[in-house]
Image: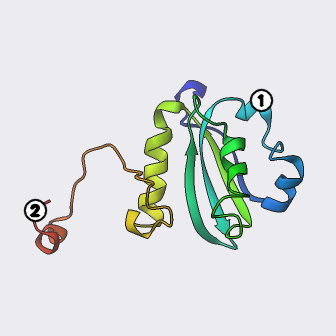
Amino acid sequence: MKKDRVILAYGRKWDRRLSEKTGFKDIPKKEEGRRSGVYVLYNKKRVVYIGKSVKHKKSLRGRIGEHITDKLKNKWDSYSWFITRKKYTSDLEGLLHNIFWKIDDVEDNEVKAEIKARRYYQKSQLRILGDE
């Protein structure tokens, strides 16, 4: 069922150098357009950054392209991108952050990606963490 999908299109482990040559226009415009999405920057196989694009702000192409001149410019060599339904974009970014690292480990500490859902702890964790 097409309208139930969360991820509408994606590209995995694309080479940064090839995309820079096209100004990141190798992300198909018909897919990217002004839609929302999540992206992951890698250095070799290691995740170095997880970000999002929200439809009303910058395009996915624009967000990824910013990282060729910002503080991450020399820290990544490939990327993956995922076009998502806008209402799921923040939750997906938060999910990726929670899978790959704790928020304190993110280089860009101003990123506060959270999953906006009720969190449950395993009983053994509650004894270690105390009541949260």
* Amino acid, disc 1: Lys
On screen, residue 86 above or below 17 = above
The number of numbered discs placed on residues in the rendered structure image is: 2
* Amino acid, disc 2: Asp
Q: Position of residue 87 (x, y in %)?
A: 47, 31
- Sooner in the amino-acid sequence: mark 1 or mark 2: 1
**Nearer to the camera, 83 or 109:** 109
Residue sitting at x 52%, y 31%: 86
Q: Position of residue 59 (x, y in %)?
A: 67, 37
On screen, residue 77 above or below 112 = below
**Nearer to the camera, 1 or 82:** 82
Residue sitting at x 48%, y 56%: 96
User: In the figure, is residue 7 to the left or right of 131?
Assistant: right
Under circle 1, the secondary element is helix
Is the C terminus in the top left, top right, bottom left or bottom right quadrant? bottom left
Under circle 2, the secondary element is loop
User: In the figure, is residue 122 to the left or right of 81?
Assistant: left
Residue designated by label 2: 131
**Nearer to the camera, 66 or 11:** 66
Residue designated by label 1: 30
Residue sitting at x 83%, y 42%: 25
Q: Quadrant of residue 101?
A: bottom left
Q: Residue furthest right?
A: 21
Distance (Cα) linking label 1 and label 2: 48 Å
On screen, residue 3 above or below 9 = above
